């Protein structure tokens, strides 16, 4: 449940930072509409590249590393983007984010399916989905209001640093040797009363 919660917190921070993406690109990086459109296309190329690499190496990479390192590199991509001063740096950040998301999401979904008993999977997903949605609303409002009083770059950098801290904690917990049994593919169901 802790891994699920931390991954959800990372998604919340992603969404909150993404809400300022266009404003950041135009106000800070001074990108035109066509430049911004091209930046989004680069992210699309990153998603395709991530999906291909993921499909090729999925059987060779442990689920814990997919979640841990995938999440960590998503945060690093956001840090590169937050500190960028040019289109090329922002493009590198976007590509890293999109590429890494393929691994993080695949690892998390596999982890979820392997560890949540089928009979309560829907309920667990609904509870966490509701919590995630509430946190997204609250965090996005906080970020939006903060931008009105503080510089947009400071808000985006702060959000990226919070996400980095969450992803470091998520990486440390997911790659812990004592928790390796939770990352075995096809390990079967975990009993409802068993601790995770």
Image: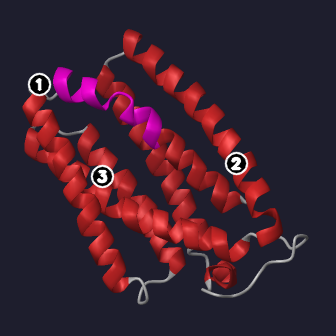
Query: Where does the image place residue 82, in percent across and percent down from the top left?
Result: 28, 38
- Spatial CA distance of label 2 from label 3 is 25 Å
The magenta stretch spans residue 131: no
Q: Is residue 65 left or right of residue 53?
A: right
Q: Which residue corresponds to the image point at 37% horizontal and 35% vertical from the top-left?
A: 18
168 and 193: which one is in front? Answer: 193
Determine which residue is flagged by label 2.
128
> Residue 31: in sight, yes or no?
no
**How is the model colour-coded?**
secondary structure
- Residue 30, disc: 1
Name the residue that disc number 3 marks.
Answer: 77
Residue closer to the observer: 142 or 52: 52
Q: Point out the stretch of residues depicted in magenta.
A: 14-28
- Is 92 situated left or right of 180 in this image? left
Q: CA distance from mark 3 to mark 1?
A: 20 Å
149 with respect to 151 (left or right): right
Question: Image check: 63 left or right of 76?
Answer: right
Task: Using the rendered view, name the quadrant where residue 22 is placed.
Answer: top left
Q: Earlier in the sequence, mark 2 or mark 1?
A: 1
Image quarter (top left, top right, bottom left or bottom right) of the N terminus = bottom right
């Amino acid at each position: 449940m802790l891994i699920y919660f931390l991954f959800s917190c990372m998604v919340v921070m992603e969404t909150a930072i993404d809400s300022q993406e266009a404003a950041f690109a135009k106000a800070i990086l001074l990108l035109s509409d066509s430049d911004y459109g091209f930046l989004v296309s680069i992210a699309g190329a990153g998603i395709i590249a991530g999906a291909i690499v993921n499909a090729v190496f999925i059987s060779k990479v442990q689920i814990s590393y997919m979640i841990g390192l995938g999440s960590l590199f998503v945060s690093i991509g956001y840090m590169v983007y937050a500190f960028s001063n040019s289109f090329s740096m922002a493009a590198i950040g976007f590509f890293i984010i999109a590429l890494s998301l393929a691994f993080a999401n695949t690892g998390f979904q596999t982890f979820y399916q392997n560890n949540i008993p089928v009979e309560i999977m829907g309920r667990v997903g609904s509870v966490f989905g509701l919590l995630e949605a509430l946190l997204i609303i609250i965090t996005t409002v906080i970020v939006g209001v903060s931008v009105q009083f503080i510089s947009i770059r400071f808000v985006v950098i702060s959000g990226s640093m919070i996400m980095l801290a969450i992803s470091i904690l998520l990486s440390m917990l997911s790659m812990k040797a004592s928790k390796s049994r939770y990352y075995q593919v096809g390990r079967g169901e975990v009993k409802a009363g068993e601790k995770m």
